[in-house]
Image (tube, rainbow, N blue to C red):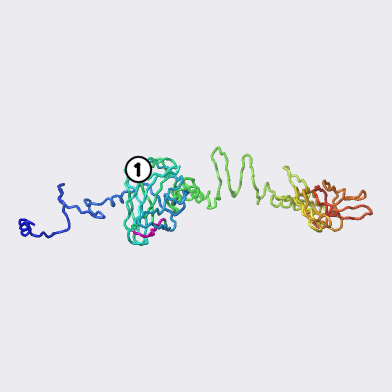
Amino acid sequence: MSKESRLIKSITPKLTPIGSELILPNTSGDHVRSIKRDVPVNEIDLVNKEYVDSMIRGNVELFLTENASDIGSYFDMEIDSTGNPEEDITQSITGQGTTLIASFASILNEAEIEAITDLELGIYSMHLHAEADFPNGMTIYFEFYRRTSGGVETLIATSHDSDTLPVVDSQHELHSSVTSDLMFNTGDRIVVKVYGRNANAPAKNITIHVEGDTLSRVEFPAFIPPTFVGAHTIVSHDTSTTGAELTSLANNSMVDALHRHSELSASDGTPDQSLVVAADGHITAVGKLHTDATPIGLDVLRSAVIGINLEVGQDLTVIRNIIVTGTVDGIDIATDVAANTTHRSSDGSDHTFLNQNVVTTATPTFAGINLGNENLNDYDEGTWTPTVTSTGGTFTPTYTTNTGTYTKIGRLVFVECDINVSAVAGTPSGSLRLEGFPFAAVGGGFRQRIEGVYGSGVNPYSQVNNTQNFMLYIIGTVGRFAAYGTGAGLTNIPSTNYTSAFRYLLRGVYHAT
């Protein structure tokens, strides 16, 4: 050091800092100093970009869920908070690297997303709950994509990194500025991808939280034509009874309810008790019910109670029942019909009939007819299923047809059946039977027999000789095929003769028990 330099240094005083704050001159004419704050208090307070971004909200929100998307390995984004319990998505983040935590996509054909025509410039932001299993060097960020119907994804925005994640659940606001508009076509979808960064050498986990009360979501500005009213109803945004009732105005259900539970009032405001609508829909007319001078008609959809008289000017059509509790022209109809003895003509003369009481049902039956000495009180008709069996061995027929019908009048049973057997399996022994008759036959032996049997394949008449008849006799509900002739007695037909296809048509009558 030169002599001059040492001299200058020895006479120069040491400077001591008087503060750590740098005050910049204000040349705007306003001599009040502005202070930069995280949250502004006064109108002139300075704020940072983070605060400004957080105050700018997009008009479209999509909430992150853990519901599987139709896009493989992606999750759904819903236009409304699902209300489901909170779900966690955990991902190991590569040491000193970046790893995708989760991808989210808007739901296919979601009406509100389909209505978007343009993604607008502005702030694209994400509100997200997250945590790490290590307190240092762990951050998250997101990317925003437009995905075409063909599956091509175009990156639109990348956010800044979050603050270092703590080891407990914390909420984070991430933002990205988009400086130009982008056309959004029919079939396009929104895709958001959340990434984790790890500044540490070993891999560490990051967990993000969605649904529940996290409201984890992405917000962005988009143009939706004002003509779009959406697929939402009041109920979809208001789960209270008020929302449901307001929506019901569209289908008149509220008006209908008011009418059903209302009471017509007179002009002075007091109830007019001549016409009352009850809660169950019944209308009670205490006095007379008048229409205008040229009435068209009165439609009664349920029931009407008429206290005095019913006057019908033209035709009266009754679809269901007429219940008479009084008299018609002085005749007690209820008592008269119950007696079932006479029918009166318009001139008042009697036409005498048999004392009858016929009641039909879905399956034709009747209560009975008095024939003088006996009452005929049994009639029925229907179907039955005939089956061919053997008294021994194994006999398993394959049916093409095995159907039967019957008509029962008193104790007489008229039966028909068609038995078409295409093959027989097994080794039968003993005699051939026909089971399934609809009613048990009276008596025993061969008194209840049916001889109207026609057949093919195994011809029934090949089973008897020229002095015998082929017949079927019934014991209980089981028929026995047999040969019967004068002096030859009764011989059951062996089932061993029936090992191939055959068809029998049977028609006859027998006495039931």
Q: Amino acid at mark 1?
A: Glu
| Residue 373 visible in the displayed image | no
| Of 209 and 488, the residue lying toward us | 209
Q: Which residue is mark 1?
A: 120
Horizontal arrangement in the rendering, residue 381 relative to residue 117 (left or right): right
| Of 137 and 156, the residue lying toward us | 137
Q: Residue furthest right?
A: 487
In magenta stretch: residue 342: no
| Residue 460 visible in the displayed image | yes
Residue 58: percent from left, percent from top? 35, 47
Q: Residue furthest front?
A: 2
Residue 221: percent from left, percent from top? 35, 45
Horizontal arrangement in the rendering, residue 10 relative to residue 45 (left or right): left
Question: What predominant SS class does the magenta segment belong to?
Answer: strand
The local secondary structure at tag 1 comes to loop
> Split into 4 quadrants, where in the image is the C terminus?
bottom right
| Of 448 and 388, the residue lying toward us | 388
| Of 197 and 328, the residue lying toward us | 197
Horizontal arrangement in the rendering, residue 155 relative to residue 422 (left or right): left
Residue 84: percent from left, percent from top? 44, 56
In magenta stretch: residue 206: yes
> Dot 1, crowdedness within 10 Å: few (<14), some or many (≥20)?
some
Image: magenta residue range: 200-210
Residue 383: percent from left, percent from top? 75, 50
Residue at image coords 64%, 42%: 317
> Split into 4 quadrants, where in the image is the N terminus?
bottom left
| Badge count | 1
